[in-house]
Image (cartoon, rainbow, N blue to C red):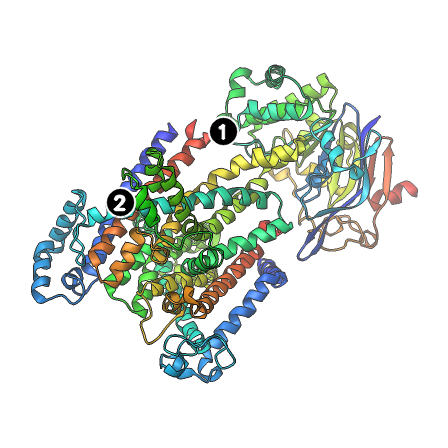
Amino acid sequence: MAFVSFLLRRLGLSVVVFVGVLLLTFIVSRIIPSNPGALYAGARPRPEQVAAIEKKLGLDKPLSEQFHIYVHDLLGGDLGESYHSRRSINADLSIFLPATLELVIAAVLIALVIGIPVGVLAGAYPRGVFDYATRFVAIAGVSVPSFWLALIAQSVFFSQLGWLPLGSRISRDATLFYPIAAQTGFYLIDAAISANWKAWFDALHHLILPALVLSAYPLGVTIRMTQASMLEALSEAYVTAARAAGLPRRVILFKLALKNAIMPALTVVGLSFAYSITGAFLVETIFSWPGVGKYVTEAVLNVDFPVIIAVTLVVTIFYILVNLLVDVIQAFLDPRLRLV
Amino acid sequence: MAILSVQNLHVQFKTPFGAVYALRGIDFELAKGEILGLVGETGCGKSVTGRSILRLLDDNAQVTAGRIAFENSDLLRLPESAMREIRGKRIAMIFQDPATALNPLFTIGQQLADVLRAHAPGAAAARRRQSLDLLASVGLPDPAQTAKVYPHQLSGGQQQRAMIALSLAAKPDVIIADEPTTALDVTIQAQILDLLRRLQRERAISVILITHDLGVVAETCQQVVVLYAGRVVEAGAVAAVFPAPQHPYTQGLLAALPRPGSRGSDLKVIPGNVPSGLERIDGCAFAPRCEHVMNRCRARQPAFTSFSAAHHAACFLHEASVCG
Amino acid sequence: MKGRAVLRIEVGSSAWFLLRDRAALISMTFLILIVLSAVFAPLLTPYASQGMGAPDLAAKFEPPGIEHPFGADGLGRDQVARLMFGARRSLSMGLLVVLIAIVIGAPLGMIAGYIGGWIDEAVMRVTDVFLAFPPLLLAIAIAAALGASYINAVVAIAATWWPWYARLARAQTLSIRERAYIEAARSIGVRDRVIIRRHILPNIMTPIIVQGALDVGTAILVAAGLSFIGLGTQAPFADWGVMISDGRLFFLSGRWWMSTFPGLAIFLTAMAFNFLGDGVRVAADPRLRRMR
């Protein structure tokens, strides 16, 4: 079975990459800094604090042993402690991670739901006005600095039009009068489970603007990649053959070529996820969105290094999983891999 | 009686370096129920001719003159909607590489159903029965199983049979087969040619067989048209042309053909290359490669000389001898 | 001889296509203007010292007007001057990131592709690991580990960027290695070092440099992001990302000009690079060319 062997190979690769990611974050946190102890002890540490940290992290031990402790702690699920707030990073992430994932998933959905059809149409009707307009939108999407777009969006939709809230995940009123019972940490899911529709709409209302801003870059990428794979599919011999057989243009474009175009285009799901995460790190602060992006940017200001490394690791693991999932789905959809 | 006739067909391609003249006046007639071989080296305009008939040329191609008469209409002047009725249903096409001409993501059955649905509205069950009949008629074993598989699960020869089944689906009168055996093994080649001959006989289909292989023409065709640099240099019945080729280019092609009993050293290769089509050619396009070249060959185009009712060639060697 | 003539036609026609692409042409002009204004900033503005950080408290928060066309910031510094001097930082960051990434990535990819075997495997797995991180995240971690500064931000981004060039160099090398003249050179015992220097390097550098030049826009965007969260250029100097960050808290309270103009500068510059890149891609790929 080609599919099973593909699956095993792909899983093996993910494991190799995961080990590499552990090693690389270890290098970044222990070898690159000139004085890792001081870095881990936060801004302007006292010498005894540094000494305590060095002892706790085993920084006086050889690197191989340090790596052993590092991996041991991580695999045991212990991400360490923030030196700014003294709180457990695990506890912090359990609150912040769902907030960011909710935002990122919303952005990815917007990018895919708009980007794929637009890219398909632009690929199907090249050289028209639509093609040029799409080209412009796609390039603008990948060129605009998200943190600047966030400011502009706030000024338009909050200050000028007053349609959408300025920031945060939910309004103060909602937290007071219709509190959401936390289960998954995804407000839209939690509110829907408890049929708390007032809070649900309130949360959605808050989600729209940041999600739209985050979707700009992945939208541009999605449009361009879908368009390219559509053009590619339309230049294949089987499209000429289908025309020679007298099939209607509609069938050729939206059945035959589309199915061939959509599989390579699925790659954009993983990319969109990555770009939305990147955007989240830059704009969460602007939207007062209590997620890992805001967590990290605050950690940068407070020189809270353990937080930065822990978030890097956790988010990267999510990204690896997303890519794995996309590849497996893609392979499953392809009869050339599924059947021999 | 001709079912399809190509008259004075000129096609050029727009490129950044200027226009490329792909066809510079092609004339031939396809008689009903016959197989006509369109031969020449790569770049002579064989495929362009085939695609012009169904108007499947790329966007940068332009038909600058000519007529393609099919029944009572000129295919070059039909509206696109009428053309769609012709494609597949009246004139179908078979391609060189079935591995790329079949859609990899649909089963053979689905692809047949698409063609049937496009040309003959009817019940799904009827379409299914028709599909199985078609697969059986092109010699595919176990049609029910074949309909369920994807192209990559078939061998090259089976893929080409499936492709032929697709082209037959809407019962066309003419099939244009563009190098249908080039991508296949020699033994499979013979089987596919047999199949084409059988279908032509049983269904009274007329076939244009595009190939660079004169051996294939000798085995399969009744008529042959030899193209060089976008022009016809010799045409006629295979029975007349092959024993006594009159144009130096046809002679060269035939000399390059391996024959039973001939040794490798006997094979002659025509030196030089086909012109690119970028430059204007005033005289005979073959002149630079021709061993009999004369001064007038470079100055103007030779006219056709008839050797019999069924054999013509365009060369000054014969213009002189016949006209005195 | 013949091969060379064909090659000349190809390059010539690509350039011809690029020049016919109006968007690419406008982009090129815009980028030349931006670069000139950055290079000659001290000559072009009367507020050169403010561009480098000196305050002028009398002009604090002055809105756009005749004296300061783009207004003045919280320390009264002329925004036009800040933008021009900021361009020096932002553009050089983008350029340096790409340069360093090519210097690291291209040789690695070339060696991997030329030698093959386990070296190839190892290099490719390392690139996999680097590309497993969401783009900005690893750069943030490295920049934080190195300490916040202009040059550290450049190094951090370049450290996450080189795998792209390694992969490109590898792919190019693989395709060239198969050519007949390389096989011939190897068979008559020409040393690998000579083959790499004479045949491989010159052939793979063109596509890598073209790709690199077009990536500068994205590198500027990422560098601005790092500066925006405080890991890039440090006060009193500023790049475009820092300027947006400085103006951010005043943006909604009516002092819109501080963030708007540097944001536009990044936006338009990145867009120009991308339009140019699109033009080059279409010009270089005859198949796309036909589609447009």
- Label 2: which residue? A18
Disc 2: CA contacts within 10 A as few (<14), some (14-19) or many (>=20): some
Locate residue A8 relative to residue A154 in the image: left or right. left
Q: Residue B183 falls in which quadrant of the image?
A: top right
Residue C136 visible in the shown view: yes
Q: Are marks 1 and 2 on the same chain?
A: no
Identity of the amino acid at label 2?
Phe
Q: Position of residue B105 (x, y in %)?
A: 51, 31
Q: Which residue is rendered at x = 51% and y = 25% of the image?
A: B154
Q: Position of residue B192 (x, y in %)?
A: 61, 24
- Label 1: which residue? B152
Identity of the amino acid at label 1?
His
Q: Residue A305 falls in which quadrant of the image?
A: bottom left
**A47 up-or-down from A21: above or below:** below
Q: Nearer the viewer, residue A219 or B218?
A: A219
Q: Which residue is rendered at x = 34% and y = 62% of the image?
A: C226
Q: Which residue is rendered at x = 41% and y = 75% of the image?
A: C61
